[in-house]
Image (cartoon, grey):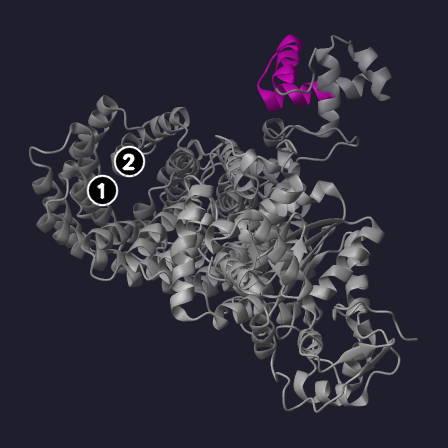
Amino acid sequence: MDGEHGTSPSMLCPDLVDRSRELTALRDRLASASDGHGGVLVLRGEPGTGKTRLLREAVALAHDLGVRVLAGRSVPDRGSVPYRPLTEAFLAAFRSVPRPTSPELAGFGAHLGRLVPAWSAAEAGVDDSPLMMGEAVVRLLRPMGPCLLVLEDLHWADAETVAVLDHLADALTGEPTLVLGTTRVEGALTEVLERLVRRDPASVLPVAPLEDGGVDRMVTSCLATSSPPPEVGAFLRARSEGISLVVEELLAGLVAAGELRLEQGRWSSPGELTARVPASLRESVARRLATLDPVPRRVVGAAAVLGRRFDWELVPGIAGVDGRAAADALRTLVDRQLVEVDGQGFAFRHALTREAVLDDLLPPDRRELARRARPVVERANPGLPGSSCELVAELAEAAGDPVAAASSLVESTRRALAGGAVASAEITLRRARRLAGDDETVRRDVDEVAVDVLVAAGKPRETLEIGRGLAGRMGEAGVAPERRVALLITLARAAVGAGDVPGAVGDLAAARAAADGHVDDALAARITAVEAHVALEQGRAGDAETLARGAVDAAVATGQPAVECEGLEVLGRIAPDLGPGASTGWLERAARVAERAGLATWHLRARHELALRTWEPEALRSTRDLAARYGALTTVAVMELSLADLALGDFDRAESLRAAQACVDASTRYGLATAPVAHLWLAGAQALAGDDGAMQVALDRALAPDPADPRVLGDLHGRVLATRSFVADDLGALRDQLDTMIGHVRAADPARSVFPGRVLWAMVHTAEDDDLGVAARAENAEATEHLGVAVFRCTADMIEAVALGRARAGADAASLMERARATDLSAGVVGLRQCVQLLAARAAIRDGWGDPVTWLRETEAFFATRGHERTARRCRLLIGEAGAPVPRRGRDTSVVPAALRALGVTSREVDVLELVALGLSNREIGARLFLSPRTVERHLGSLFVRTGLHDRGALGALARSHGVQDG
């Protein structure tokens, strides 16, 4: 049916033509997200194919489903504004909402503040990476129910937004959020799209041009008629290439030129179309611009220099017209389909439309508009917040003032760096360096911020190249000594990081020379702290200690807690040479100083180092929790990895499985380097559980990144499979596993792994080889000396004791064994000692020395209380082989504390002990336990013998001390 039209009908297509496949995909993905299975879906196509129109349909579908919608977009040439589309989306959605207080968001205050400035808080964070920003997005949206996050024009996205999107593709698979983006075929998203397609081909939805039939249907819809002139359809099929935007634009051009007319309710084309009508979108826009009066022409040019979306209140000052004239001009531009209403403002109908307007401007006109726009934008945005700083830089460059543009970009770079957007900072920096040209003042500013950016980007060599040249130019220009000294200190740190210790020495000498008589004590303290690091790198421990102490004292006097922490770290690194635990005091002080000063990075750094030095479960857990509060999820994963390592060493099935799985989940989610070892410890947990199938799956995943990695292979054979041999009582397989292990251990970097399995290897060879394992003992002794860890010294003594016992020096062997057993060990390494002790006891029974029964009772109690019954049974069999009474499980289910089990106490004797502690008589105990008084008396006699006690009161006290009876 023919439609009725006004004198200037809109050529915007009211219908979505030939997109049923895309709509079905959108509907399905939204439904999945509503069910808790979200993810990322990107619409990819050439400009003008209808991606934005599909977004509008998706938003309408989301509203119908009750899905919350957030939306933002990237813009061209504003790459230095990190997270721009995310900030736009979240700011619009949460502008007036109080900052959420969910415990899940602890440590993400800084990230939330970047999304919604009103949520900025003093809460410190230590990881500003895009990955953590992505995690903040996931956790913020999680409690809000189903959400659709629309991110448009991602081909212009900043590097940080691209990295967040990459993270969200995996992180949202179990969340009720769908991210829906649009991108052109080429652009910032190209590499991420390739990864998305590899992981899930359905995550990228191509939006192809229309076929000829689709173009015809679109013409019918745009003209609201069932019978458009056939020549119009043929013309558009030939010229539009199936691009829906071009169809609409060419129709608008035909109507504007009078080549397509609506007369008496019917469309007609009175003449030849191809001779006079534009053949491209740009020509179509240019032709409509040519029909504009001078005021709308100036207004559209002024709007174009401001961006696709523009603040219409700024337009009159740039165009040189009054407000009423500007409003009338905007109405004309909307009528001509060049501009559209966008909420409370205006936007060009398409990015291509704005580009066509800019291309139509003569260079002098474009430069003049940019020159006029710059002060207007600066007055309207005091301090140039957000993207206005980048806009001013664009305008300065367009106005022919590249030096001013470079100055603005220096500020943009500083802001990006302060916000943790290192990639965007580096992109902006390189543009600023290009624009600065020969202006030495601006070049110094650019290169000075370049040093900070390149340090943050982990590029020390480029830092040194630029920075050392800058330091020389600063000296020639007479720049303030304080500024030059600060630069040289940064360069010295970068040189140490790059392994250029001589260069660091030169930088510090130059800093001292520049500082002489010109700088205060505070800057001198900073120099001294770096000198302490350099001395330590040079192996001058005494000088390093003197310098570090001086830096700490000067930092305290000048109120510089960060410098104080730096000096304390050096002292903490020197202290281990003075003996076990010597570094703890320095590191604890650094942690206290950092915490008081709110220095999150230093606080966590000190606590992290302390946890790894002490290797105590509680220290690791508290550091894990601290890292979670700071949003340092990588450190959380490292602490879980350490806890899994400890639990595996303690033969604790439940904790080993929990911690290893937590680290595997985090490593997979955040793409961490801890993944192979996390899978390895998960395999160990499955070995403890006796699940060989799950163990093998985890081992395969541990080896997947590098099947020849000697570190993984060494612990695979020496930890995981050796652990399985013990808990499965398959000690016959142990030697082959350990011999395989040692080849990998020798190939691995000794500075990066510990390999406790080497101890078992040395013990097996000492107990079995004809030469008493002399080479294995020597190799183990060398490693023990290098590592300086108590458990290795202890087990090395046990190995030597076995060698002495085999050499018929039984008394010396027994003495050395008892000294080793007296060593106080922390949790997580006791299991290794128990395994070595079992092997030593087996050798001692064979060779006739020492007190293997006592050792085996302790080892049996260790494994029995952890549920490893096969190993405990092996201990009991060896006790019987030694001719001693074998510990029995009681007929009850009472738990025997490990210390009592080591004495041979059974669960039935624990039942009796508990009732003795309550003051019951033998007859009363017998009545409770359904035993005869004589049987109770026999159990009491056994308790007196096992414990060495002599009366019931002492037994009661023993029960209470071991938690058998609380009363």
Identify whether 842 is placed above or below 466.
above
- Among the 4 quarters of the image, the one containing residue 768: bottom left
Residue found at x 82% / y 72%: 20
* Magenta range: 938-961
Which numbered circle lies on residue 566?
Answer: 2
Q: Label 1, on which residue?
A: 533
- The quadrant in which the C terminus is found is top right
- Among the 4 quarters of the image, the one containing residue 668: bottom right
Residue found at x 40% / y 46%: 415
Q: Residues within 10 Å of mark 1 (few under 14, many from 20)?
A: many
Q: Nearer the viewer, residue 585 or 494?
A: 494
Secondary-structure class at tag 1: helix
- Could you tell me the amino acid type at mark 1? His
Q: CA distance from mark 2 to mark 1?
A: 9 Å
Identify whether 484 is placed above or below 560.
below
Report if residue 962 lies within the magenta region: no
Report if residue 942 lies within the magenta region: yes
Q: Residue placed farthest to the right in the image?
A: 1
Q: Nearer the viewer, residue 207 or 361?
A: 361
Identify whether 39 is placed above or below 602.
below
Q: Residues within 10 Å of mark 2 (few under 14, many from 20)?
A: many
